[in-house]
Structures are given as C-alpha cells and as structure tokens.
Amino acid sequence: AQSVTQPDIHITVSEGASLELRCNYSYGATPYLFWYVQSPGQGLQLLLKYFSGDTLVQGIKGFEAEFKRSQSSFNLRKPSVHWSDAAEYFCAPSFSGGYNKLIFGAGTRLAVHP
Amino acid sequence: DTAVSQTPKYLVTQMGNDKSIKCEQNLGHDTMYWYKQDSKKFLKIMFSYNNKELIINETVPNRFSPKSPDKAHLNLHINSLELGDSAVYFCASSQGGSGGPPDTQYFGPGTRLTVL
C-alpha cells in the first residue's frame, strides 16, 4: 500500500538552532517527493521537490531535503531556523506520477522559540 | 496578481443548505484540484480536472459536485451540507496533469466552511 508518515506531530526549536523534519514513505518504487509549508491561515507553498538525480535538493527559504532510498525517507532540514519558519510542514509523495496525485502526510507543526 | 483565488474565504451555513465555492487560476494551467483539510490539518485530495475533464475522483459523497466551466475555473458545489463537511477547502492548479513527472501544484488561500 502507498502511504506517507511524518512521525513528529509537533516540534519546538529555538531560533538559530538546526532543524530536521522526518518523512517516510511506503511504496514499491521511488515516488516523486515534495515538501510544502503552510503558514497560519494561509495556503500551501512548495518548498522543494525531488524527482531523480542528486539526492540532496535545495529549496526556498534556506531549506534542503535528502532522499535516502534505503530508508524510504525524504527528510527536510534547515541549518538555522528563523522565527518566521513557524508553520505546518507537509511531506507529499506522488505515487502514480500520472495524474499529479499528491498524498499528504499528517504534517509537522513547527514552533520557534526566541 | 493572485495566482489561485478562492471565494468566499469564509462560509458559515446551516445543515441541509446547498453552497458553492469558486476557484479561479490565472496561471494558464491545465489542471485544477480540490482538497479538503480537516480540523487536524489532514489534507486529502477530492477531485482533479485536466482541461475540463475529471481525472481524479476520490471517495467523496456525491453531495459534492465539481464543475469546470473552463480550464481556468473549478467550482465546488455541496448539497445538503452536514456537520462533518466543516473544513478548509483548498483549490490548487498545476501545469500538467497526466503523464510524466508531476508538476508543482499552486494552492489558493483556502475557504473555511463551517456548518452549524
């Protein structure tokens, strides 16, 4: 069965600290992988995506993610978190590839302490 | 210019009513989507249209009916509203929709529906 898991529902970090948000998927092949961010009261914005090639991808706002096939993971990282990064983060694989169907994880809510 | 817009932003209504949410995109995209986000932030696709043709139709009650008058618009009509329909509904669009790697989906700001 195709599924995605974001194990951390809520993460709190201090401003300036590093961040890693976890994402694991279950699928017989490599899906297309996306990370989206949702700021409070807003729609979703694409942070980055992975289709193939270099397994470390760079995104907007200083975020990066690393695809690890052996672990079926696509974790999101940022070396130094800013207060404005407080938001909900969604990992979203696309398994079919044919109809752009995204399967969203449950999301990780990030809180940033000053 | 707003890329993907939705109206209304907030919708409060009584159980049993019929309501519509409108979505428009000015990105020239071929594909549009409706998602439902529940109170726990869980986001699930409902429908997708590519060039006015329905291509994704998830397990959604038939009280929900999408309509795409042209490829820039995708409206969502809901009949006989129920308490469980309360959620935030997001519209999105993307360039492609069938074949090849998926294109980035651009989301609207959402419509918060509250059914009393």
Image (cartoon, coloured by chain):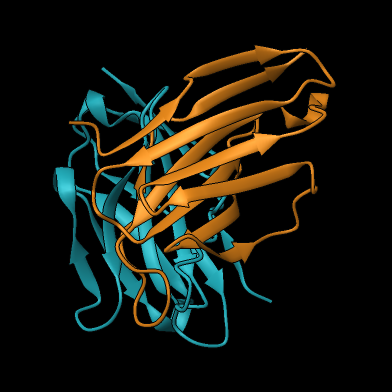
Chain colours: A cyan, B orange
Q: Residue A34 falls in which quadrant of the image?
A: bottom left
Above or below, comparing residue A8 to residue A35 in the picture: above
Point out the image quarter for the C terminus of chain B: top right
Above or below, comparing residue B36 to residue B71 in the picture: above
Name the spot of residue B36 as percent of width and height, x first: 60, 41
Name the spot of residue B54 as percent of width and height, x first: 57, 63
Name the spot of residue A61 as percent of width and height, x first: 16, 42
Q: Is residue B67 left or right of residue A97?
A: right
Q: Is residue A75 left or right of residue B75?
A: left
Count of marks placed on residues:
0
Name the spot of residue A64 as percent of width and height, x first: 22, 57
Q: Residue at x 50, y 87 (%)?
A: A29
Q: Residue at x 42, y 44 (%)?
A: B73
Which residue is nearer to you in this view: B109 or A63? B109
Above or below, comparing residue B12 to residue A52 in the picture: above
Q: Is residue B44 left or right of residue B49?
A: right
Q: Residue B40 falls in which quadrant of the image?
A: top right
Which residue is nearer to you in this view: A85 or A13? A85
